[in-house]
Image (cartoon, helix red, strand yellow):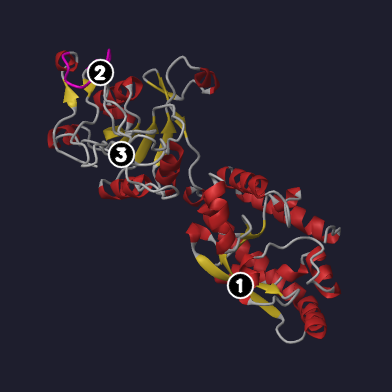
Amino acid sequence: MSATTRDERLSGGAAGTGGGGAASPAGPAVRPPTGPESGTGAPDAMRYRLPTRRGRRSRRGARPTIVLGTGRHARRLASVLLDHPEHGLAPIGFVDDGPGAGRTAGQAPGRLPGQAPDRAPGQAPGQASDRPERFAAALREHRVRAVIVASDPAPGADTPVLARIARDFGCEVFLAPEPGGLLTDFLPPHGHVRGFPLLRMHPVPQTRPSWPLKRLLDVAVALTGLVVTAPLLALCALAVRCEGGPGVLFRQSRVGLGGRRFEMLKLRTFHPRDPRESETRWSVAGDERVGRVGRLLRRTSLDELPQLWNVLRGDMSIVGPRPERPFFVDQFSRSLPHYESRHRVPAGITGWAQVHGLRGDTSIEDRARFDNHYIDGWTLRSDIKIIIRTFASVLRPSGG
């Protein structure tokens, strides 16, 4: 990734004479990123240029913006935004998308013979690209406040990943389909900037005004739950002790908010043969390791009651995606594209997937889809609704 202080804005004549830009009816063109290629013969995956100081002063108050895409549509949109700072978005450069990212028009793809299109030259199979890390570093370094997705991602492109990184970083993210396309028929009349459609991506829940109320709800429900269920919790602990011997509480490493690990508490329903077994063996209904007391606790979800303490500690929330063990998080993250997006909010005792019957030995892909839907549309009302539905399901338990 290279950055310079050279002005991106070229005159219309220069853009039309091979200067690397594309003429725009709205005025001067925005020059696409160009620059030296890497030593392997492949272009840099991400490049952008910064305006001159004079250009930055003229757009004071507008938010620094990166455009994902380097095609004609992306350059025209950036040109319009540069000419009209009153819209509050000041493009500072572009990020190429898709396999062979970093090419300029007319360049051959910078891939080695036989190399998969979604790997950088010299990158081993299964090795993750460093584009997301470099993109996040660029957001921090240049204090980017907005990102515009102005391209149709090619197969293997990581544009969706970069857009989510920007959103989780606190940037406003906009989708900018080409004017006249099918998607524009679904946009409201005010979702345009000088004729260019702009669709705002949902912000992360933590940026919404009602988000602090979620923590207040968590503390209130957890405290009330611990006080009200204390006698029941004591009886359950006694039953576990009588059936399985010492060791009433079960502690296990789980993955929560931002991929951080924490120790989740449960009432013990069986004794694993060794620590490795508890970390890597998938729990299924009818597990022969579980006794009668354990089956009752699982069927009624009473084994989850100690997690109210996790909520008070701040490890978890009452409502959120169920936390999983690190071993399985690694597996699912490799096989399911958006599994890690579940970690955008704290893990929960119950969740949108669970109240729809997706608990225990059910589809991980379905669970992840329900969890991400919950996160994308989070409201305090949805949390209250899920809590009520969870109480109702506990009163009429089913499963094993």
Label 2, secondary structure: give it. Answer: loop
Does residue 397 lie above or below 279 as drawn?
above
Q: Residues within 10 Å of mark 3 (few under 14, many from 20)?
A: many
Label 1, secondary structure: give it. Answer: helix
Residue 375: x %, y % from top left: 57, 47
Residue type at the position of mark 1: Arg
Does residue 168 lie above or below 324 as drawn?
above
Label 3, secondary structure: give it. Answer: loop
Measure the C-alpha gap from mark 3 to mark 1. 40 Å
Residue 322: x %, y % from top left: 64, 58
Residue 44: x %, y % from top left: 26, 39
**Res 210 visible:** no
Residue found 27% across the figure and 21% down from its top: 106
The quarter of the rendered structure image containing the C terminus is bottom right
Nearest-to-viewer mark from 3 and 2: 3
Measure the C-alpha gap from mark 1 to mark 2. 59 Å
Q: Residue furthest bottom?
A: 246
Magenta span contains residue 20: yes
Q: Range of the magenta residues?
A: 17-27
Q: Which mark is residue 22?
A: 2
**Residue indicated by mark 3:** 45
Residue found 22% across the figure and 25% down from its top: 31
Residue type at the position of mark 3: Ala
User: Residue 373's image quarter?
Assistant: top right
